[in-house]
Amino acid sequence: MSKRAAEDESLAAPLKGGDRPEAMDVDKDHDMGEFEDDFEDEFESEDEIIEAGVDGRPDAEREAEEGAMDVDGGPETFMVGRQQLEAGQTLTPDTTTYKMLHSLSTPWPCLSFDIIRDGLGENRNVYPATMYTVAGTQADGAQANDNSLLVMKFSGLSKMQGEDGEDSDDEDSDDEDTDPILEHKSIPLNTTTNRIRSHQSPAQDPSRPPTTLTATMTESSQVLIHDITPHLASFDTPGMIVTPQQNKPVCTIRAHKTEGYGVDWSPLHPAGKLLTGDNDGLIYVTTRTDGGGFVTDTRPFRGHTGSVEEIQWSPSEANVFASASSDGTVRVWDVRSKSRSPALTMKISNYDVNVMSWCRQTSHLLATGADDGEWAVWDLRQWSSNPSAKPAPLANFNFHHEQITSIEWHPTDDSIVAVAAGDNTVTLWDLAVELDDEESRDTAGVSDVPPQLLFVHYQNMVKELHWHPQIPGALVATGEQFSVFRTISV
């Protein structure tokens, strides 16, 4: 949940699905906004470091806001997406509901990003936390040539402290007073990024790190595959320089005639197998060969009558994938099909189906999010090839009043789902929650708030979110800024 406080500031309007955030007004002389390309002409041995306060704002600004809140008698609880802000009001987070909360800025908004698995350990709860990500920028218009792929390291991610200055929980911590730091390596793209996904192939030598690949769906319709292994290594190898040759894509896929948003690497093909879908409704498969090259099958999968908005491989069947489209359908395919047509087609919405997430813990569960703000969970075992069959979703929610922009199952809990929407919110849901009769009476008057709703996090222009696979409960979301947080609810 969030709180509101009076300030001479207003919220930007949420973006519709597919819209690109406007470029941020960046003062190039300010440390927070200066992201120079490390590889244009000269090379430096030190990475660029960007520091932010606890919530991404200068201490003076935050203290002034807290003072204004005290004058007004304290903030009120505010439900984002259900209430309207009054003129001159803006939102501040209720920090008592977070275990960790940080904002980090980039010079241009990023529509899409992905989290890179690292070698720092599984299920870690040590703070300050460190994580690695990759993102593509959204510099439009005259600045389009400034676009780049950003390989980033977030560090110094400390946890929240209690009001008495003590730790808010009993987890291990080395230093609670650190500020978050963002280091980056920049790979020039000269085009905006619609969506980016990463893949790691195990090294033949166990002592060496895995090869980390990225696939970038661009506005130019090309799909660029980069090997960012040296970029990641350079963060933790003093003096290591990434050469211009290592910034070049290892493969450029030119099969698509229009831009697209659907892209996914198979989790069951270690070498690398990639799906890409475009606005013409066509889907292509690109496979990494034994020699390290890439081959794209020129025969597309056809069936959608609208743009392919999302693609995901099955987490349990190596030859099966699903796609979601602006035609309101989800289709399930088998790559071995000679007809290149879908095995199953299900009309699930009268609106664009923007996003989709396949549950890795229970692989017959699929979550979808549509342009009308509704998201749903489906049991694929109830789907059939009979076109007249219309199974009901296991659960569906219309809490959000704007389009769903991202959805993802918790990596280890098949009842927890995170959802991002155009109403500037990230919501966390527990599908296992049910109300008994007494609880139903207690919740009278808030019937439009489902009992499964665990948490509401405000983030301006939020576009995509991901759970961190190695830090339990940690979420990263991109919008006007990057938000890294962990709630006390999950």
Image (cartoon, rainbow, N blue to C red):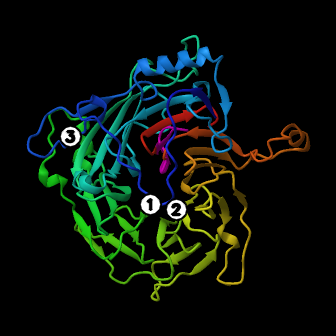
* Number of residues whose C-alpha sits closer than 10 Å to that of mark 2, classed few (under 14), some (14–19) or many (20 or more): some
Q: CA distance from mark 3 to mark 2?
A: 38 Å
Q: Is residue 242 above or below residue 90?
A: below
Let me know if residue 466 is in the magenta part. Answer: yes
Tell me which amino acid carries mark 3.
Glu
The mark lying in front, picked from 1 and 3, is 3
Label 1 residue SS: loop
Instruction: Determine the residue positioned at 83% across, 41% down.
Output: 445
User: Along the polypeptide, which appears first: circle 1 or circle 2?
Assistant: 1
Q: In the rendered image, which residue does mark 2 sit on?
A: 315
Looking at the picture, how far across and down is residue 209, in whole percent?
29, 46
The residue identified by callout 1 is 267
Q: Disc 2 marks which amino acid?
A: Pro
Give the residues in magenta. Answer: 462-477
**176 relative to 357, above or below:** above
First-in-chain label (1 vs 3):
3
In the picture of the structure, the residue carrying the numbered disc 3 is 36
- Can residue 265 be spotted in the picture? no
Q: CA distance from mark 1 to mark 2?
A: 7 Å
Q: Is residue 304 left or right of residue 246?
A: right
Looking at the picture, tell me which residue is in the foreground, 220 or 166: 220
C-alpha separation, residue under disc 1 versus residue under disc 3: 34 Å
Q: Is residue 144 left or right of residue 113?
A: left
Q: Nearer the viewer, residue 268 or 366?
A: 366
